[in-house]
Amino acid sequence: MTEYDETSSRPTTHEVWLPRNATSPGHVTQRLRFIVAYLLVASGSALASPCQFESQGEGRVAAIVDARSVRLDDGREVRLAGIAPTATTQQALISLLAGRDVMLRSADDTPDRYGRQGALVFIGESDTSVQAMLLARGEAVVSAEIVDKDCAAALMASEAAARRQKMGSWADPSAIKNAESPDDILAEIGRFAVIEGKVLSVRQAGATTYLNFGRNWTRGFAVTISKRTLAAFESAGMALKPLENRRIRVRGWVEGTIGPRIEVRLLGQVELLGANEPTGVRP
């Protein structure tokens, strides 16, 4: 759903303004020293890229299995962590990764129940993950599963940049669903969706908290949060009751037992939006 502008990893020139008549050799030298100093600082910041987790091995991509998985030449299957695919993700992976040497990075190399190793994937010696490239081009969506704060923020920034520029999937006005249109959300059952709207009420029933976006609970869109997940929100200082009458953006897999639902299991699935913020452009 987004496209990435890889400027965050490049040094940025910061110009220091001196008096207009500062043309003497001494002043010119001073100006150059200031510029060089800023470049060094910027370069140092760029080198301290987020998402540089422990290396979990490397290999050559032998096949693109699906929109979020690749197989290496040694037989390992790798699932690209941190993103959910869009309609163009698989083709983008073919263009980016087919036959390429890659490095895998993650905090944990434990395979999932399908035997896939979840990781951030880097081409060659690049400091920018394939996930960030896809997000910045609007060809993937942040899934919110990366819990490292700096890395999660970097991935979200890549997506936000693509939203602002209407890159890739974000060029489609329906890329972000309106919480007030439950029928449109129901059409996304079984898919990962991004939805925006105003929370009309926060209610608790048993061990589940509901963020309701409609008056009719049998038809309206709602977010569900289990008691276990609620503790994580409270630990992070994010109370749910004050979300009433606030606009939020939520992302996750759409279910449809009684009206469209998204179960929130991770803090990163919920974003607060400003009262006057235009749809879909939160930085």
Image (cartoon, rainbow, N blue to C red):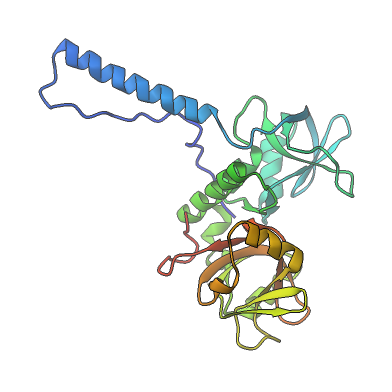
* Nearest to the observer: residue 278 or residue 228: 228
Q: Quadrant of the N terminus?
A: bottom right
Examine the image and state in which quarter residue 30 appears. top left
Residue 201 image position (x, y, % from top left):
59, 80
Drawn side of residue 252 relative to residue 282, left or right: right
* Nearest to the observer: residue 15 or residue 102: 15
Q: How many numbered dots are placed on residues in this image?
A: 0
Residue at figure coordinates x 89%, y 50% from the top left:
113
Above or below, comparing residue 205 to residue 240 in the picture: below
Residue at the limit of the structure toward the bottom, as seen here = 216
Residue at figure coordinates x 61%, y 56% from the top left:
236
Above or below, comparing residue 188 to residue 60 in the picture: below
Residue at figure coordinates x 56%, y 53% from the top left:
168
Above or below, comparing residue 245 to residue 163 in the picture: below
Residue 130 image position (x, y, % from top left):
65, 39
Report if residue 193 is visible in the image. Answer: no
Residue at figure coordinates x 51%, y 51% from the top left:
162
Drawn side of residue 81 relative to residue 117, left or right: left
Report if residue 217 is visible in the image. Answer: yes
Above or below, comparing residue 243 to residue 61 in the picture: below
Residue at the limit of the structure toward the left, as seen here = 21
Residue at the limit of the structure toward the top, as seen here = 25
Residue 179 image position (x, y, % from top left):
58, 75
Residue 123 image position (x, y, % from top left):
67, 30
